[in-house]
Structure formats: structure tokens, C-alpha cells
Amino acid sequence: MTGISAIFADWGTTNRRAWAVDRDGKVLDQRKDDQGLLGVKDRAFEASFRGFIGDWLQAAAPKAPVVMAGMVGSKLGWREAPYVATPARFGDLPRNLVALPDLDGHPIRIAPGLSAREDGRPDVMRGEECQLYGLWLHAQETRLCVLPGTHSKWAEIKDGGLATFRTYMTGELFSQLCSSGTLAQLMQKDAPHDDDAFRRGLAVSAGASAGALLNRLFSVRSLGLFAELPPEALASYLSGILIGAELRDATAGIRGSVAVIGSSRMTELYVSALDAIGIKSAAIDGDPLLRTALLAIARDAGLM
């Protein structure tokens, strides 16, 4: 393969993705695997990365940079890229890149994550900040955004950066409740999404305080015990309760629409939920945003 001017990577906890691009950011090749941080033995990150994209390094133009985002820059990653505190401008990202030793003459940089504080409580993100930067590059305007996932991130783009953000452990809690404990005992595993049950869960979450949410969650079990919801619908009902609680808290008092950034499966679910509670939203694929941001970061850092 010829024409590779840069290599971009999103290296997370459980998987990683990479793209070989030309000077304009056009994707020439892409790949992914399940070798996230947890899959790398004895911190052999360089050897693992060579095994992943070594052929690209050999084919790339001399000094073509490698720019990475995500958990690869955490304390458990290849090298820690310290957090930049919000409010932060997107221009702070290229100014705070962390350098690794060159690979075969190719400079390697890791983008920093961001941190925030609310009432003394710290919050962090890694990787999502680049997708948000990519969105801002496409439309330079103030926006409220959500990036659904294991740990959903709600962030406000403002004044060319992020004003602040909040994390909700919705996905992780859903996974834990579906895999162990009394709620999981009644569920049918791997059942297809049940939209009616999901919307019933959304409705149940209305007006629920943090304490009331704990009460609502028990209804997953009780509805199953009384056969008022079948086993194959319980996970969707649970998802509705948890996502509903997240959305109602995160959007309290907002006006305007929400940008929902991520994969199609999760964005469709959140768009549907936001519509059900009367909030406009738009689904946006996160991968092109990430690549757009990493290209801008590489250029701003003088790597391309």
C-alpha cells in the first residue's frame, strides 16, 4: 500500500481500532481487534502495536506520524498523557500531546484526556474529547452532546472547547444487573430489543429521585415474578429505566437539541429515548469525527 501519510488509532480498554490515511485524511485501510489494554500482556504495548499495524509502518511515507487517543494514554496504558482540566479549548489537545519513542522513524503521539470537577468531585474522559473536537470542526457552535456507552459522557461544547462534562455509569450498571443478581435470574439472555418494554421503563423513570430509582429497579424483578412482562422483555425494560434516569438528569432545564455521538445501535436507542421525553436530537457517527480531530491535531502539532 502506498500513500499513507498518517496512522490514527483509538486504543481502548477492551478493543482498538486504527486507520491508515492519506494527507487529506482519506481512509486507505482500517482494522480493529480485541487487543485493548486488558489484552496486552506484561505491558508489551510496542510489540502489540507492531503486530497490529506493522505493515502500515513499513509502507507509510517517511516520518508519517502515529496519533492515538483513548485509554492508551491512561495510567494503565502505554504512557500516561495527563488530563487537561476543563474548561479547555480544543487547541489544548495538540499542545499537550505526549511523545513516545519513534517507531522505525515514525513519531508517535498520544492525545490527552480531559478532567472536570463538580462540587469537588473529579470526572474524566479519554477518547471522547477527540470526537467532540471533530464535531466542533464540522459545526463551530455551542452544543450539548452525549456519547452513550459503558460510561456515558454528557458534554457542553462552548467557545471552541469543552465547558464541562459529566459521566453516567449507565451501561456498566445495565451490564452488571443483567449478568448477576436477582434481576438477571428472570431475564432471557440475548433477547432482541423490545421497544414497548423499553418505553415502559422510560415512563417509570419519570420523576424518580436517586432513591426512587432504587425502588423502580426492583420492578424489573416483580414484573417478571407476576408474569406482567415476559423474560425476553425484562432487559429492555431495565434499559429504559436506567437510560431514562440518565436522560432526565442530564437534560434538566436544557433547551435545544442534543447531539448523540457513537455507533448506530446506541445512538438509535438514545435518540428514541430523547424523543419519548420530548427532546430533539440527532445521531452522529463518532468514527469520522475522531479521524477529523486526529488529523487536525497532527497538523496543529506540526506532524503533517
Image (cartoon, helix red, strand yellow):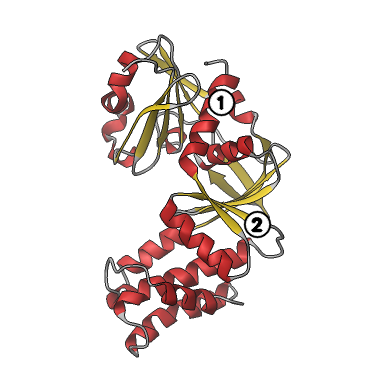
Circle 1 sits in a helix, a strand or a loop, which is it? Answer: helix
Q: Residue at x 42, y 59 (%)?
A: 172
In the image, is 54 to the left or to the right of 292?
Answer: left
Q: Nearer the viewer, residue 205 or 211?
A: 205
Q: Is residue 73 above or below residue 147?
A: above
Q: Is residue 80 above or below residue 223?
A: above
- Label 1 environment density (alpha carbons within 10 Å; few <14, some 14–19, many ≥20): many
**Residue type at numbered disc 1:** Ile
- Residue 281: x percent and y percent? 59, 57
- Label 2 environment density (alpha carbons within 10 Å; few <14, some 14–19, many ≥20): some
In the image, is 286 to the left or to the right of 106?
Answer: right
- Which mark identifies residue 91? none
**Residue type at numbered disc 2:** Ser
Front tag of 1 and 2: 2
Q: Nearer the viewer, residue 155 or 289?
A: 289
Q: Residue at x 40, y 71 (%)?
A: 236
Q: Residue at x 71, y 64 (%)?
A: 253
Q: Is residue 166 above or below residue 135?
A: below
What is the quadrant of residue 233 in the picture?
A: bottom left
- Residue 114: x percent and y percent? 58, 39
- Which mark identifies residue 257? 2
Question: Which residue is identified by label 1?
Answer: 297
